[in-house]
Amino acid sequence: MWVRCGQQASHCGPMRISLPDPDLCGELASFLRACGCDAVESEFGVEVATSRWATASAARCDLGLYADVWRLLHPDAPAALDD
Protein backbone atom coordinates (compact mmCIF):
# COMPACT_ATOMS: atom_id res chain seq x y z
CA MET A 1 0.00 0.00 0.00
CA TRP A 2 1.41 3.38 -0.96
CA VAL A 3 0.50 6.33 1.17
CA ARG A 4 0.34 9.89 -0.06
CA CYS A 5 0.02 12.51 2.64
CA GLY A 6 -2.21 15.45 1.83
CA GLN A 7 -0.95 17.99 -0.67
CA GLN A 8 2.52 18.14 0.89
CA ALA A 9 3.98 14.98 -0.60
CA SER A 10 7.49 16.46 -0.42
CA HIS A 11 7.15 16.59 3.36
CA CYS A 12 5.47 13.23 3.70
CA GLY A 13 6.86 10.76 1.19
CA PRO A 14 5.42 7.43 0.15
CA MET A 15 5.10 4.62 2.68
CA ARG A 16 3.92 1.08 2.25
CA ILE A 17 1.98 -1.44 4.31
CA SER A 18 2.60 -4.99 3.16
CA LEU A 19 -0.04 -7.70 3.23
CA PRO A 20 0.67 -11.40 2.70
CA ASP A 21 -2.47 -11.69 0.55
CA PRO A 22 -3.12 -8.94 -2.03
CA ASP A 23 -6.76 -10.05 -2.21
CA LEU A 24 -7.23 -8.36 1.18
CA CYS A 25 -6.51 -4.86 -0.19
CA GLY A 26 -10.21 -4.08 -0.45
CA GLU A 27 -10.80 -5.04 3.15
CA LEU A 28 -7.75 -3.05 4.27
CA ALA A 29 -8.96 -0.01 2.31
CA SER A 30 -12.36 -0.28 4.04
CA PHE A 31 -10.65 -0.58 7.41
CA LEU A 32 -8.53 2.52 6.75
CA ARG A 33 -11.61 4.47 5.63
CA ALA A 34 -13.28 3.50 8.91
CA CYS A 35 -10.21 4.96 10.64
CA GLY A 36 -10.81 8.28 8.89
CA CYS A 37 -8.37 7.86 6.01
CA ASP A 38 -9.18 8.62 2.39
CA ALA A 39 -8.23 5.16 1.05
CA VAL A 40 -8.84 3.66 -2.39
CA GLU A 41 -7.67 0.50 -4.11
CA SER A 42 -5.37 0.92 -7.05
CA GLU A 43 -3.49 -1.42 -9.34
CA PHE A 44 -0.60 -1.19 -6.88
CA GLY A 45 -2.59 -1.93 -3.71
CA VAL A 46 -4.22 0.74 -1.55
CA GLU A 47 -3.51 4.45 -1.79
CA VAL A 48 -4.21 6.75 1.13
CA ALA A 49 -4.27 10.54 0.97
CA THR A 50 -5.21 12.70 3.91
CA SER A 51 -4.51 16.31 4.75
CA ARG A 52 -4.31 15.61 8.47
CA TRP A 53 -0.76 14.27 8.07
CA ALA A 54 1.62 17.19 7.79
CA THR A 55 4.79 15.14 8.26
CA ALA A 56 6.12 11.69 7.44
CA SER A 57 6.61 10.92 11.13
CA ALA A 58 2.94 11.70 11.88
CA ALA A 59 1.80 9.48 9.01
CA ARG A 60 4.17 6.69 10.08
CA CYS A 61 2.86 6.89 13.65
CA ASP A 62 -0.81 6.71 12.62
CA LEU A 63 -0.27 4.01 10.01
CA GLY A 64 1.78 1.97 12.46
CA LEU A 65 -1.10 2.06 14.92
CA TYR A 66 -3.61 1.13 12.21
CA ALA A 67 -1.36 -1.80 11.18
CA ASP A 68 -1.21 -2.93 14.82
CA VAL A 69 -5.01 -2.94 15.08
CA TRP A 70 -5.29 -4.73 11.71
CA ARG A 71 -2.94 -7.47 13.04
CA LEU A 72 -5.12 -7.92 16.12
CA LEU A 73 -8.27 -8.21 13.99
CA HIS A 74 -6.62 -10.39 11.30
CA PRO A 75 -3.96 -12.58 12.94
CA ASP A 76 -3.72 -14.76 9.82
CA ALA A 77 -3.21 -11.74 7.52
CA PRO A 78 -0.84 -9.37 9.29
CA ALA A 79 -0.09 -5.96 7.85
CA ALA A 80 3.41 -4.61 8.27
CA LEU A 81 4.51 -1.02 7.86
CA ASP A 82 7.63 -1.22 5.68
CA ASP A 83 10.75 0.78 6.47
Image (tube, rainbow, N blue to C red):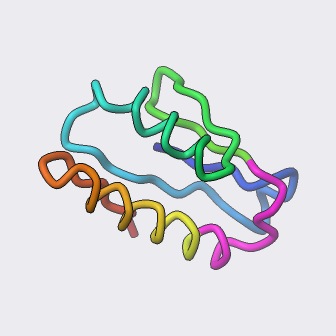
Examine the rendered structure and indicate whether residue 61 appears above or below residue 51.
below
Q: Main secondary structure of the magenta part?
A: loop
State which region is magenta: 50-59
The residue at 59%/44% (across/down) is 34
In the rendering, at what x and y percent does residue 83 appear? 40, 70
Q: Is residue 12 magenta?
A: no
Residue nearest the observer in this picture, 71 or 50: 71
In the rendering, at what x and y percent does residue 3 appear? 59, 50
Residue nearest the observer in this picture, 46 or 26: 26
Give the side of residue 26 with respect to residue 11, left or right. Answer: left
In the rendering, at what x and y percent does residue 10 appear? 78, 62
Query: In which image quadrant can residue 12 be found?
Result: bottom right
Query: In which image quadrant can residue 70 be found?
Result: bottom left
Give the side of residue 30 with respect to residue 49, left or right. Answer: left
The residue at 23%/54% (across/down) is 78
In the rendering, at what x and y percent does residue 2 appear? 53, 45
The residue at 31%/60% (across/down) is 80
In this view, the residue farthest toward the top is 43
Examine the rendered structure and indicate whether residue 22 appears above or below residue 17.
above
Give the side of residue 43 with respect to residue 71, left or right. Answer: right
The residue at 43%/27% (across/down) is 26
Q: Is residue 54 magenta?
A: yes
